[in-house]
Amino acid sequence: MTLQTALIVAGIVLLLLVVAYNQWQIRKARRPRALQPEDDLPPMREPVVSPVIKPEVSAKLHEPSPEHQVERREPTLSASPLDAAAVAARMAASSADADDALADEVAVAAAPSSTHAPHAPHAAAGKPGHAEKSGQPAGPTEPHDAADHEERAEQVKPKQEPAPAKEPQPEPVALDGQPTPAVIDPLIDCIVPLHLERKSSGDRILPLTGRLRRAGTKQVHIEGLRSEANAWEPVTAGHQYEDLQVAVQLANRGGALNALEFSEFVNAVEALAEALDASAELPDMTETVANGRELDAFAASCDVQLGVNVISDGAPWSAAYVQTVATQDGLVLSRDGTRFTRYQANAEGVQRALFTLQFGDTNFLRDDLTAKAGRQITLLLDVPSAAQATKPFKTVCEYGYSLAQRMGAQLVDDNMRPLSESSFVAIFGQLQTLYDKLEARGMPAGSPVTLRLFSL
């Protein structure tokens, strides 16, 4: 027990000694000490003005010239208020001069030396970066006068210019008169009005029209009545509409609207009306189908395609040769590669197909044009699709005669008889009858409604 007690006492004494030593060291470290001359202190760090500073520029920065020195002026109690204001103005001007001089030196130091880079022509005022846009390197130029120094100072300390104000957007101009249809035409369409309970936006209507694209083989169109313009237009996002009208085409070159296509159309219209809380005025199916058949019969009586042929007098032509001639004459190959098309601008400046060129059953995209050969080129005129004012048949015949002269051939009709003056007179008479028939129906040849009727 005596040994154990002695060890405990010795441990406590040792612990107290350690604590006392630590406290002494802490007080010793906190005690302030005067700075001695022999103390080795790190030098003060100079401010960095530019990544690369030449010695002479550095000397100028640290030892400003006498004219750049700012004279220190102590304030005096005996000075009058006017004298104090003058002193303050002189001090501000002197400080501004010193700042400008420092900015000039910094700009000169940052620019590369003129002895190592060629001079570049001065860019136009107000167009920075003009040399880069034109593909020429923008080399530095040496300062020549005080104006150049001021320009460089402005580059070092650019000023923020206020953002230009946005131009006001013009308000939509309302049109006078009654609403006019944009695409839908009662001559060839079955129209279903949709009366909205309240105005609806195009952004709400468009996602609901997924099923209103086609009904079988017939096109479907939907338009809205804009109160601002007082006119019908295809439904557009961002516009507000008071009423809607949906129409299905009664006939096209695929035939008349049948009962199955009408039912498909009606179901889609009812779904749209329910989604928009609108009321639809659905037509009678029997009457609509009958109207489609009558329109289809009329279109069939006017659906005339007039062709003339260029027949070789000698050896057959290769398809590659025909393709070269058609391309040089400005004809455009169709997407399926079966024909070339000559386009002509109408009265509105829109390019419309005038006639086509076919070389038998040649497909200019898939067939071997060097192996494919033939002796007949057919120029085909779609009469209802070409406006009478453009004199399409005359244009076709003139181009056919041009081909015959260049290719060593002759121009003949569908019965392989040479085209004579009497045959031209007879054809022109038949065409005039057809044009009058279309005009009397309100669908002149080449008009938008006629193009829709004689399409697929």
Image (cartoon, grey):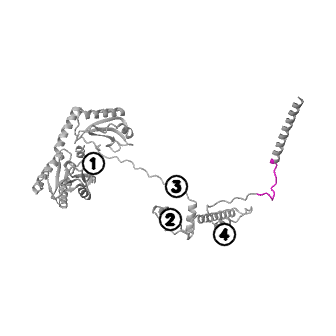
Q: Which residue is mark 2?
A: 138
Which callout, 3 or 2, points to the residue nearer the camera? Answer: 2
State the residue at coordinates (79%, 57%).
39
Alpha carbon separation for disc pair 4 and 1? 85 Å
Give the farthest residue toward the left: 422
Amino acid type, residue under disc 2 in the picture:
Ala
Question: Under tag 1, what secondary structure?
Answer: loop
Alpha carbon separation for disc pair 3 and 2? 28 Å
**In the rendered structure, does residue 408 fall within the stretch colored magenta?**
no
Q: Which residues are magenta?
A: 29-40
Which callout, 2 or 4, points to the residue nearer the camera? Answer: 2
Mark 1 or 3, nearer chain start = 3
Alpha carbon separation for disc pair 1 and 2? 52 Å
**Crowd around label 3: few <14 · some 14–19 · many ≥20 (10 Å):** few
Alpha carbon separation for disc pair 1 and 3? 57 Å
Q: Is residue 413 above or below residue 455?
A: below
Q: Quadrant of residue 269?
A: top left
Mark 3 or 4, nearer chain start = 4
Q: Which residue is mark 1?
A: 336
Which x, y percent locates residue 182? 29, 44
The number of numbered badges drawn on the structure is 4
Q: Which residue is mark 4?
A: 67
427 or 183, which is in the foreground?
Answer: 427
Mark 1 or 2, nearer chain start = 2
Residue 180 visible in the shown view: no
Q: Is residue 5 left or right of residue 82?
A: right
Q: Is residue 32 left or right of residue 368?
A: right
